Image: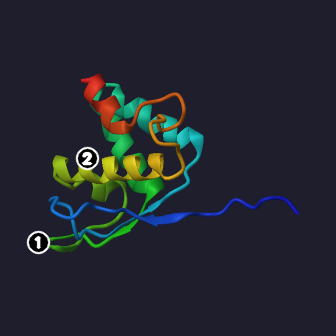
Amino acid sequence: MGYKLGPSVELLDFVSGTPLHGLKVEVNGDVSLSTFFDLQIWLSSGDAAQMRAAFVLFGNDILVSWDLEDDEGQVEADGEGMLSLPMSLAMGILEAWSDQMGSAKKAPGASQNGISQSVGELIETGT
């Protein structure tokens, strides 16, 4: 019997004292390399259409659930829900996922995947 791949749902950890502390966001902790690389490439591209696609990809393929509400009620935990968020909130969620999932199994001081920068660093260098 071989090793069976399965979903890995993780709760993002937002540091106490930060604006997102208390927000509950569940995400897929294990995504395909294709999804991971597409997300990094699109976010670092500087192209608005590709960056939009990255947030939709995150919402549809990585985001599992959250406890976000707006004036109209529950915000859907999907690509359209991601696009409805203020930029700082959407980026905070995506960066928390990148930091947490990228650092969960790596050695201290190592890059996220052995070759690439974190999403936060890519966004900074891509602009």
Residue 55, given in percent of the width and then of the height, sits at 34, 46
Which mark's residue is nearer the viewer, 1 or 2? Answer: 2
Three-letter amino acid code of the residue under disc 2: Met
Q: Secondary structure at mark 1?
A: loop
Residue at 44% over, 36% down: 109
Question: Which quarter of the picture shows residue 23?
Answer: bottom left
Please, is residue 95 above or below residue 4 in the view? Answer: above
Report the residue at 38% width, 54% height from top. 59
With respect to residue 99, does 41 lie above or below? above
Colour scheme = rainbow
Q: Residues within 10 Å of mark 2 (few under 14, many from 20)?
A: some
Q: Nearer the viewer, residue 82 or 116?
A: 116
Residue at which label 1 appears: 71
Which mark sits nearer the N-terminus, 1 or 2? 1
| 14 sits left or right of 32 in the view | left
Give the labeled residue for mark 2: 91
Q: Residue furthest left?
A: 71
Q: Position of residue 93 (x, y in %)?
A: 29, 54
Q: Is residue 45 above or below residue 26?
A: above
Looking at the figure, which quarter contains the C terminus? top left
Is 88 in front, or is 102?
102
In contact (CB < 8 Å): disc 1 and disc 2: no
Q: Secondary structure at mark 2?
A: helix
Question: Which quadrant is home to the N terminus?
Answer: bottom right
- Which x, y percent locates residue 116? 47, 29
- Given residues 75 and 41, the one toward you in this image is 41
Camera-nearest residue between 59 and 116: 116
Q: Where does the image place residue 84, in percent across and percent down from the top left?
A: 22, 55
- Mark 1: amino acid: Asp
The quarter of the displayed image where residue 2 is located = bottom right
User: Which residue in the rendered view is the most extreme toward the bottom?
Assistant: 73
